[in-house]
Image: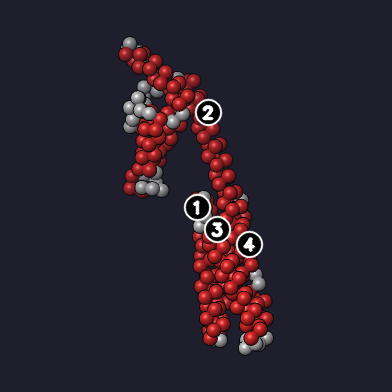
Amino acid sequence: MANDYYHTLEVSPTATQTEIKQAYRRLAKLFHPDSNRSTANHDKIARLNAAYEVLGDPQQRQAYDQRRSYHAHLEAAGFSVGETTRQERTAAAQARHRRTQKTGRQADAELQEWINQIYTPVLRLLHKILDSFNDRVDDLAADPFDDELMQDFQDYLEDCQDWLYQAERIFRSLPNPPNVAGVAANLFYCLNQVGDGIEQLEFFTSSYDEHYLHTGQELFRIAKGLRREAQAAVKAIA
C-alpha cells in the first residue's frame, strides 16, 4: 500500500496507540519549523498529520488496517493497486476539510480565551495606572513640599505597584497564541516601562529631584504608546 501510514510514522503495524502517539510527537517535533529549523519539512509534517489522523483514532485505524490488508492480498495476487481508491480519496478530502475547520475553530477559541483572560484584565489594570497619572502629577505640582499632597502621590504609587504586580501575574498565567505574538510583545514592554517608571517616581518622592520625575513621565508616555499599539493590533485581529 503506497504511502503506508505505519511507515510514515516509523512504527510497526502492531504498535500500541501510545507508541503511535509517541512516534508522531517525536517526528513532528523533529520536522516542525518552530522547533527545529535545520530539519524543518512542511511536506513531511503534512504526511505525518495525515498518518496520525488515521492511526491515532482506533476506529479509523481499524478501517485502515482492513483496507491495508485487502491491498496486500491484491498485490500478492499480482494485481496493481493504485495509491488510493475513489472512496479513499473522498474520505481523505473530507478528513482534511474537517481538520481545517477544527484547526480554525481551535485558533478562534484560543484567541478569545487569551483576550478574555489575559489581554482585557491586563489592559484594565494598565488603565488604572496610566490614565490617572497626569492628574496625580498636576495635584502634586500645586506644592511638591506639601506633606499631604506628597503622601497622596506616594499612596498612588503604592497602588500602581499592586496593580502592576497583578497585571504581570495575569500576563504570565497563559501562553499567548501565535497570532497575537505582536500584541503580547507590546504588553510585555509596556509593563516593563511602567515598572521602570514607578521606580523613577519613587526616587523622586524621596529626593525631590525633578530629573526622576521627568524620567518617570517619559517612561509612562512610552508605556501609553505601547498600549495603543497593542489595542490597534487586537482590533486588526479580532
Whether residue 127 is visible, yes or no, is: yes
**For the residue marked with disc 4, what is the amino acid?**
Arg
Crowding around mark 2 (Cα neighbors within 10 Å: few <14, some 14 to 19, many 20+) is few
SS at circle 3: helix
Q: Is residue 203 left or right of residue 55?
A: right
Rendered image quadrant of residue 75:
top left
Q: Are marks 4 and 3 in contact (CB under 8 Å)?
A: no
**For the residue marked with disc 3, what is the amino acid?**
Ile
Q: Where is residue 166 in the image (x, y as percent from the top left)?
A: 56, 62
Q: Do the residues labelled 3 and 2 touch (CB within 8 Å)?
A: no
Name the N-terminal-most of marks 3 and 2.
Answer: 2
**For the residue marked with disc 2, what is the amino acid?**
Gln
Crowding around mark 1 (Cα neighbors within 10 Å: few <14, some 14 to 19, many 20+) is few
Which residue, given by chain and number where applicable, does mark 4 sit on?
A: 124
Count of marks overlaid on the render: 4
- Residue occupying the point 62% across, 83% down: 150
Q: Position of residue 13 (x, y in %)?
A: 35, 25
Which residue, given by chain and number where applicable, does mark 1 sit on?
A: 175
CA–CA distance between discs 4 and 2? Answer: 44 Å
Q: Nearer the viewer, residue 149 or 237?
A: 149
CA–CA distance between discs 2 and 1? Answer: 31 Å
Which residue, given by chain and number where applicable, does mark 2 sit on?
A: 94
Q: Do the residues labelled 1 and 4 touch (CB within 8 Å)?
A: no
Which residue, given by chain and number where applicable, does mark 3 sit on?
A: 170
- Residue occupying the point 60% across, 48% down: 112
**For the residue marked with disc 1, what is the amino acid?**
Pro
Name the N-terminal-most of marks 2 and 1.
Answer: 2
Name the N-terminal-most of marks 4 and 2.
Answer: 2
Crowding around mark 3 (Cα neighbors within 10 Å: few <14, some 14 to 19, many 20+) is some
